[in-house]
Amino acid sequence: MESAVLIDTAIVSYALGPDSEWKSTCQRFLRRAEAGEFRAYASVEMVQELVHHRLGRTGDRQRSAQQGRDAAASCTLLNFDREVPDLSLELIERFPAVRCRDAVHAATAIAYGIERIASTDRAFDDIPGLTRVDPLNFT
């Protein structure tokens, strides 16, 4: 899947969040996905994680849920089956910098044969079989 990219939650969170060094970069990246420049995928965990963070930040249940729906509609969601949690646990054991939800995103990408993951998080850099795509330098 050469033009496939799995989207980490951080990309969507920065795009929706308050002004930051990443906000406009992540918004541009997501617009490119919507324009069809590449195939955007996400773990179903991305939606859950996004809504969790947005709800905690804003307290607005309806808006947070709608942002989750919008994020889900903007990419192809990939199933969370038995292979994903098993692989994510292996990643957690092998790579100390990888947190639990990041391990799920990475495991999803690996399980589905997606070699690139868009993220601002360098924890993905050490995972064999994955190439982290910095939205700032995405080509």
Image: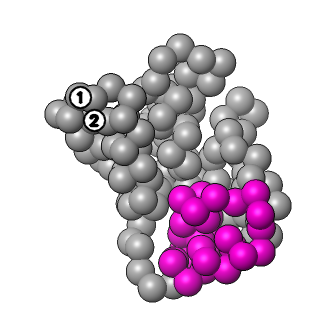
* Three-letter code for the amino acid on which mark 1 is drawn: Asp
Provide residue 116's location: percent of width, then percent of height: 67, 57
Q: Nearer the viewer, residue 14 or 116?
A: 14
Q: Quadrant of residue 93?
A: bottom right
Residue sitting at the far left:
62
Q: Which residue is mark 1?
A: 60
**Label 1 vs label 2: CA separation?**
6 Å
Q: Nearer the viewer, residue 95 or 45?
A: 95
Which span of residues is magenta-colored?
Answer: 84-112
Magenta segment: does it hold 100? yes
Q: Is residue 73 above or below residue 135?
A: below
Provide residue 82's location: percent of width, then percent of height: 45, 85
Q: Residue at x 75, y 33 (%)?
A: 137
Q: Nearer the viewer, residue 60 or 108?
A: 60
Q: Are marks 1 and 2 in contact (CB under 8 Å)?
A: yes
Residue 68 at least partly seen = yes
Provide residue 127's location: percent of width, then percent of height: 77, 65
Q: Which residue is mark 2?
A: 64
Magenta segment: does it hold 64? no
Q: Residue at x 65, y 18 (%)?
A: 21
